[in-house]
Image (tube, coloured by chain):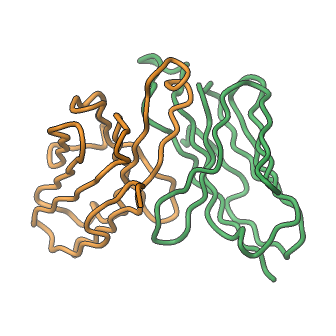
Amino acid sequence: TQLLEQSPQFLSIQEGENLTVYCNSSSVFSSLQWYRQEPGEGPVLLVTVVTGGEVKKLKRLTFQFGDARKDSSLHITAAQPGDTGLYLCAGQGPMDKPGGTSYGKLTFGQGTILTVHP
Amino acid sequence: DTGVSQDPRHKITKRGQNVTFRCDPISEHNRLYWYRQTLGQGPEFLTYFQNEAQLEKSRLLSDRFSAERPKGSFSTLEIQRTEQGDSAMYLCASSLITSGWGLMKNEQFFGPGTRLTVL
């Protein structure tokens, strides 16, 4: 069972469309990070959200952290072929599992593979 | 380039052989992490160091795996007696923690990874 569930797993859209990727958990995280990964490369950090309800914008990308710090979403407006890649959410923690808070490791979702067709 | 670097980028080995990977973190970062990623999955945590101290190890890290960060700078990950199930991308990341807020945020920056194939 994944601690962080990402949906959808695959997304194939046309250039110019909007999309939203979801990252859900029953656990609370101290922070949540979104990464983008190209084939054969390491993940590249896009944004970190820490405060419940926080919204951050990065050009056409909008990131939101849920009020209870258990879920997050990534919304892309007017997608472009250059947005193609694997999008990963990663939570630091969790904070409410046996063993207490782990301020160190990231727990990743399984990723969303986005393909934007010209 | 002052990002995280990893060496080698690719390693092909035969089952039963030992392999060692190196990671050089961003120079001022005090934390260094190792993750493993298999095809179609997100990275899974293996272990991390703060300076030279290894603070946490995952249950995924069997006795055949050992990681070191002897001087608090670069780190090595060794896999002894490799098995086909060890085939994966091994990722290193680093972060700088200087305060409580930094601990909450803990932004980790990843290297390009080492792709291991065990035949």
Whether B23 is drawn above or below A49: the answer is: below
Residue B45 left/right relative to A107? left
The one of B74 and A54 positioned closer to us in this rendering = B74
Instruction: Identify the residue at image location x=46%, y=25%.
Output: A103
Residue A27 percent coordinates (x, y) = 61, 27
Task: Point out the image quarter for the N terminus of chain B.
Answer: bottom left
**Residue at coordinates 10% horizontally, 65% vertically from top-left?**
B16
Q: Nearer the viewer, residue A101 or B52?
A: B52
Colour of chain B as rendered: orange
**Nearer-the-camera pick, A3 or A38:** A38
In this view, which residue lies farthest toward the bottom? A118
- x, y percent for residue B50: 30, 30
Question: Which residue is at a point 63% across and 47% down the rendered structure image?
Answer: A34
Where, quadrant-wise, is the C terminus of chain B in this rendering? bottom left
The shade of chain A is: green
Q: Quadrant of residue B6?
A: bottom left
In percent of the image, x 29 and y 68: which residue is there?
A: B116
Q: Which residue is more in the foreground, B55 or A44?
A: A44
Disc count in the image?
0
Residue B12 place in picture, x, y as percent = 23, 75
Q: Is residue A60 left or right of residue A46?
A: right
Q: Position of residue A77 (x, y in %)?
A: 87, 59
Q: Is residue A23 above or below residue A42?
A: above
